[in-house]
Amino acid sequence: MVTGTGAPDAPAAAVPTTALEAELRGLAGAVPDPELPVVTLEELGVLRTVRMSGPGTVRVELTPTYTGCPAIEAMSSDIERVLHERGIPEVSVVTVLSPAWSTDDITAEGRRKLAEFGIAPPRPHHADGPVALTLAIRCPHCDSTDTELLSRFSSTACKALRRCAACGEPFDHFKEL
């Protein structure tokens, strides 16, 4: 495994150019996030590219949810394992920091799964759409917007701990970045 920091070879979420690259991207993208196993790396939006860089050699690019994210090592190992099991002898997983990951990279399916799991997903940012007039966070249990912040940090740095005043349940909120 080679884990480093470098510039990406292709834009974020580059389209595979071969059927094998598409298959390998599907395998790597199906790896569950080690901190939020309810979502895959593809749904979380951290998987950037999967490219054949030579015969039997694959380069995978990941962008962590934030610089210094400790889960990146587990993600890399899990991707290596899955691709080795597929018969790829040489797997290079590289951490790329540009372009930076954003909560906008989470897919609609990923947002749905987070909410279903009891984590309030981040609000989508619409650069070309209307600006939301409310900053309310909806409770994933009862859908109330009557929630309060308990702690800016929860089980991971990318989540905050909140409580719903309507149903009384605590819940994580995936912070917008």
Image: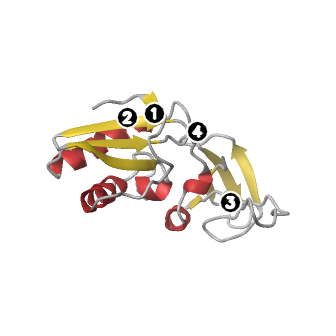
Left or right: 1 with respect to 139? left
Residue tagged by mark 4? 157
What scheme was used to colour the molecule? secondary structure
Q: Amino acid at mark 2?
A: Glu
Q: Amino acid at mark 3?
A: Arg
- Mark sitting on residue 70: 1
Measured from the top left, where is residue 98 in percent x and y?
55, 38
Secondary element under disc 2, as helix, strand or loop, is helix
Measured in 3D between alpha carbons, the distance from the residue under mark 1 to the one under mark 3, in whole angstroms, is 24 Å
Query: In which image quadrant can residue 135 be found?
Result: bottom right
Q: Earlier in the sequence, mark 3 or mark 4?
A: 3
Secondary element under disc 4, as helix, strand or loop, is loop
Which residue is at the front of the view, 174 or 1? 1
Left or right: 150 with respect to 131? left
Measured in 3D between alpha carbons, the distance from the residue under mark 1 to the one under mark 4, in whole angstroms, is 10 Å
Residue 39 seen: no
Crowd rating for badge 2 (residues with CA inside 10 Å; few <14, some 14–19, many 20+): some
Measured from the top left, where is residue 28 in percent x and y?
32, 52
Q: Earlier in the sequence, mark 1 or mark 4?
A: 1
Query: In which image quadrant can residue 24 be found?
Result: bottom left
Measured in 3D between alpha carbons, the distance from the residue under mark 2 to the one under mark 3, in whole angstroms, is 27 Å
Indicate whether 51 appears above or below 127.
Answer: above
Crowd rating for badge 4 (residues with CA inside 10 Å; few <14, some 14–19, many 20+): few
Q: Earlier in the sequence, mark 1 or mark 3?
A: 1
